[in-house]
Image (cartoon, rainbow, N blue to C red):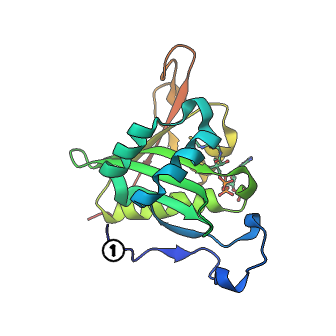
Amino acid sequence: MTAEPLERSLDHDDRLAHPGLPPEDLPLDLRTARESDLPELRRLDEEVFQDFAYPGFLLRQLFDMYEEHFLVLDDGTGRLRGYVLAATRTIGADSWILGLCVTPDRRRHGLGRELMREVLSRLRRDGIKEVRLTVEPANLAAIFLYRSLGFRPEEPDGGLRPDYFGPGVHRQVMRLDLPGGP
Ligand SMILES: CC(C)(COP(=O)(O)OP(=O)(O)OC[C@H]1O[C@@H](n2cnc3c(N)ncnc32)[C@H](O)[C@@H]1OP(=O)(O)O)[C@@H](O)C(=O)NCCC(=O)NCCS
C-alpha cells in the first residue's frame, strides 16, 4: 500500500457528524483502492457496465498492476459510489483510462470530474506524458466530461474506430497530452 498524501474527503465534513443522512447524501472519500474493496468494486462495475464489466479475475489483476492509479469514492458504509482506473506503461510514458464511473444517484455533482482530475494529477506526478481512453461514440455525458478536461479525438477519422471491441462495437479514441511532468 502506498502513502496517501492526496487522500481527502470531498466535502470536508466529518461523516460521523451526520449519522442520520440518507446514503445518497453521505460525504464521500476519494482514495486509492484497497484489496478489501475488490468485491464491492466488482459489484459496482457490474451495476454500471453490465455486459462490459470486467471479469473478477481481471479486475483483481488490474488492481495488482495499477493500484496507485485505481481510485474510489467511498461513502463510508461499505459502498463505493464510483471509481477510476488508469493503466500505465513506462516505455512511452503513456497511460490508458480503463474505467470511470459514478453511481446513478451521485451523478452530475462533479464527482466524475474529481476522479479524473485526481488520477490525471497522479499520472502527471509519475511522469506520464500522454493519456488515452476509448468512449462509446453516443456517450455524450462522458465525451463532454473528457472534452472539458482537455481530451480531444485522436486522429484519423475524428477518433472513430469501428468494431474496436468486436463487430458493431465502435469506440472513439480520445487523447490528452500532459505537460509539465518530470
Ligand atoms: C460519465 C460519468 C462518469 C460522469 O460522472 P458525473 O459525476 O455525473 O460527471 P460530473 O458531474 O463530474 O460532470 C462533469 C461534466 O461532464 C459532462 N456531463 C456529465 N454528465 C452529463 C450528462 N448527463 N449530460 C451532459 N453532460 C454531462 C458535463 O460537461 C459536466 O460538466 P458540468 O456539470 O459543468 O456541465 C457518469 O455519467 C457515469 O458513470 N456514466 C456511466 C459510465 C460511463 O459511461 N463511464 C465512462 C465510460 S468511457
The residue under label 1 is 3
The vertical placement of 182 against 135, above or below, is: below
Give the total of numbered labels.
1
Could you tell me if residue 150 is visible in this image? no
Position of residue 39 measured from the top left corner of the image (x, y, whole percent): 50, 50
Q: Is mark 1 within 8 Å of ligand 1?
A: no
Residue 42 is situated, as x and y percent measured from the top left of the image, at 52, 45
Q: Residues within 10 Å of mark 1 (few under 14, many from 20)?
A: few
The residue at the point 46 percent across, 52 percent down is 38
Element under disc 1? loop
User: Which quadrant would residue 59 be assigned to in this image?
Assistant: top left
Q: Residue furthest top?
A: 167
From the viewer's side, name the closer residue of 74 and 160: 74
Front in this rendered view, residue 155 or 121: 121
Res. 169 in view: yes
Q: Is residue 162 above or below residue 63?
A: above
Position of residue 25 measured from the top left corner of the image (x, y, whole percent):
75, 69
Identified at 34% across, 44% down, the residue is 61
In this rendering, the answer to whether 78 lies above or below 41 is: below
* Residue for point 39% across, 63% down: 122
Residue 124 position in % (x across, y down): 36, 61
Q: Quadrant of the N terminus?
A: bottom left
Type of amino acid under label 1:
Ala
| 170 is higher (above) or lower (below) than 128 | above
Could you tell whether 86 is left or right of 12 in the image? left
Q: Quadrant of the C terminus?
A: bottom left
In this view, the residue in front, 90 or 155, is 90
In which quadrant of the rendered view does residue 128 lie?
A: bottom left
Residue that sits furthest to the left in the current view: 91
Residue drawn at (39%, 77%), measured in percent from left and top? 5
